[in-house]
Image (cartoon, coloured by chain):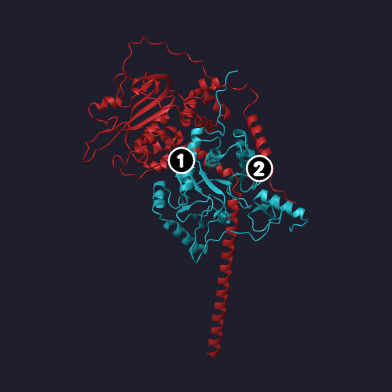
Chain colours: A cyan, B red
Amino acid sequence: MAEPRIVYNEGYLDEQTKRVVRRALLKGVAVPGFQVPFASREVPMPRGWGTGGVQVTAAVIGPEDTLKVIDQGADDTTNAVSIRQFFEKVVNVHTTTHTEAATIIQTRHRIPETPLAEGQIMVYQVPIPEPLRFLEPRETETRRLHALEEYGLMYVKLYEDIARYGHFVTTYDYPVMVNGRYVTAPSPIPSFDNPKMHQSPALQLFGAGREKRIYAIPPYTDVESLGFEDYPFEPQRFEQPCQICGAEDVYLDEVVMDDAGAVMYVCSDTDYCQKTAEAAAAAGQEIPV
Amino acid sequence: MYVAVKGGEKAIANAHALLAQRGSGKDARIGWRQVRDQMGVLISRVMAEGSLYDPDLAAKALLQAQGDVLEAVTLLRSYRTTLPRFGTTTPLDTSALPAERRISATFKDLPGGQQLGATFDYTHRLLADDLPTPQPPAAEATEEEVAMPRITDLLGVDALIEPDRPEGWSDPEPADLTREPTVYPMSRAERLQALARGDEGFLLSLGYSTQRGFGRTHPFAGEVRVGEVEVSFEAPELGFEVPIGRMEVTDCQMINQFVGSAEQPPQFTRGYGLVFGRGERKAMSMSLVDRALRAEEFGERQVSPAQDEEFVLSHADNVQATGFVEHLKLPHYVDFQGELVLLRQLRREFEERRELEERQESEQRRQAEQQDKKETAHG
């Protein structure tokens, strides 16, 4: 039989490209929060669907790794399933839904509720890596602003929020100051998750495929959500517990139950929800609904 | 009891099966050779925007994508990017290309002549039930091959048009957009790469906008050529050029006005377009946009979208554009939840403020009424 014409490398990306991505990652780790331009490649999913995260994961993953992929906090959302299946296919990697068991967690829009540990890598999918983009559409301009550490625009925006509404009105992708130097986009995670980035023992890597940028936050780095002395940053919180597992102080999905306005609040992190529910069942506790 | 939405894995498998069914139909499958040979213009577009000259793979991609051009382009690009790179070919010599088609709108006749070739121009666009089997025209007694110098070389003799290369040009390595990060401002070579990969429709509209006055450049189609050109590669271990194949390209030299400046006499300027296969519309649009993007070079006022490098180049890539637009289909529960909570809070605060104001108003009214009563009583 003739050799097939189309063959793909282990991990999809060719080795040269993996090295290109790794170099960008190293630079990112060396300058926390700085957006490193890299020649983002096409990957077999559409732009805006996690192509940056996929390239970062493909560049750092090996056969001994255990991969967890979440979207909106859940392992079973279709895009998370699709990306997990992609890596199962091209790297033959072990996958898991358990946060503790994973060595690499690729995520879209959430940080797991279970605290991360040393040795773990978080890979964030980033749509717009530039935190100043909606204030200044030009890349040439925003790069200059970062170089000069000129973040007045951002503080004026936050000030205007307070003047108009009495508090900050950014609920996700809430800008952070990394290592006291670069204002950085945490990707569209809810502001609820922002505090988890501060002094995290895990390595946090960010890939923006369409926008061709990589950035990183090394373990145990200061990550401060922007605010003012008299109006400090406050993450959004929920007053009610999860109605499946009873967990409190977690991010919740609002599930519409009928057309009469009945809703139910459940954990956005499905792995955490399952774990908490099992622990509660083992302890013989009733879940307050 | 509510159970969290599950079943992503099964849903995906089912969706894939349904998609495959959609793409098969009842008749015999179309062979990729049929697509390659009978839909040449479409193949050209997929190759151009997919940045890979391979009609066979483009045909396979189109079939796999069920005719979705952008999907086929994406397939081709994500395959292309995994291929190792051996090096770069030597520049194509488009003046040596024996044109199957060559027209100029600037001169009635010119060395090498006008040659209409295979074109939809001057056909009557009448929808036909059946396509007749074509009878190729009888070959005319060919005179000996005439040279076809490029129109820009003809004008260049009198310095009526800017030269191929600016003065002091040192043949720098053209950058490679697919392997190096984008940094603005780009060199013209990089811009042309981005435009050559850019979406035909987007460039068409931008080019059109320059004709309508948004960054006007007074263009003339100096020359449009379609033909096969030889591709040569200089392998370092050999030290000389070896032809590695031929490819069909469309090349457009646009001639544009320039009034000159204090330092420079008036001279025609140019915009350039080059695409894989038969893609005149794209090559012409590309040359219009290329010229518009050179506004700064000629000290022209930059006020229109087509002159704005960052705007044009960061939005011309249709793989990026379609991906990001369509990503809105992905779940955004988490962010939407954040907005929902905030909106409810803002509305609650608004109501509270209004109630407070109403209370204060009625209190004031009450006090005023009392005051009135007092005054009437006293009076």
* Residue at mark 2 shares a chain with residue at mark 1: yes
Query: Who comes first in sequence, dot 2 or dot 1?
Result: 1
Disc 2 marks which residue?
Answer: A96
Query: How many residues crowd around disc 1 within 10 Å: few (fewer than 14), some, or many (20 or more)?
Result: many
Query: How many residues crowd around disc 2 within 10 Å: few (fewer than 14), some, or many (20 or more)?
Result: some
Front residue of B162 and A229: A229
Is there any visible trace of residue B157 in the rendered image? yes
Image coords of residue A102 (percent x, y)? 63, 44
**Answer yes or no: do the residues labelled 2 and 1 have beta carbons within 8 Å?**
no
Image coords of residue B68 (percent x, y)? 55, 32
| Relative to B159, A223 lies left or right | right
Label 2 sits on what residue type?
Thr
| Relative to B204, A253 lies left or right | right
Front residue of B334 and A234: A234
Front residue of A184 and B371: A184
In which chain is the residue bearing label 2? A
State the separation of the CA atoms marked 2 and 1: 29 Å
Badge 2 marks a residue whose secondary structure is: loop
Q: Residue at x 41, y 50 (%)?
A: A142
Is there any visible trace of residue A126 in the rendered image? no
Disc 1 marks which residue?
Answer: A38
In which chain is the residue bearing label 1? A
> As displayed, is residue B143 above or below residue A147?
above
> As displayed, is residue B110 above or below residue B368?
above
Image coords of residue A127 (percent x, y)? 52, 45
> As displayed, is residue B137 above or below residue A120?
above
Label 1 sits on what residue type?
Phe
Image coords of residue A261 (percent x, y)? 68, 56
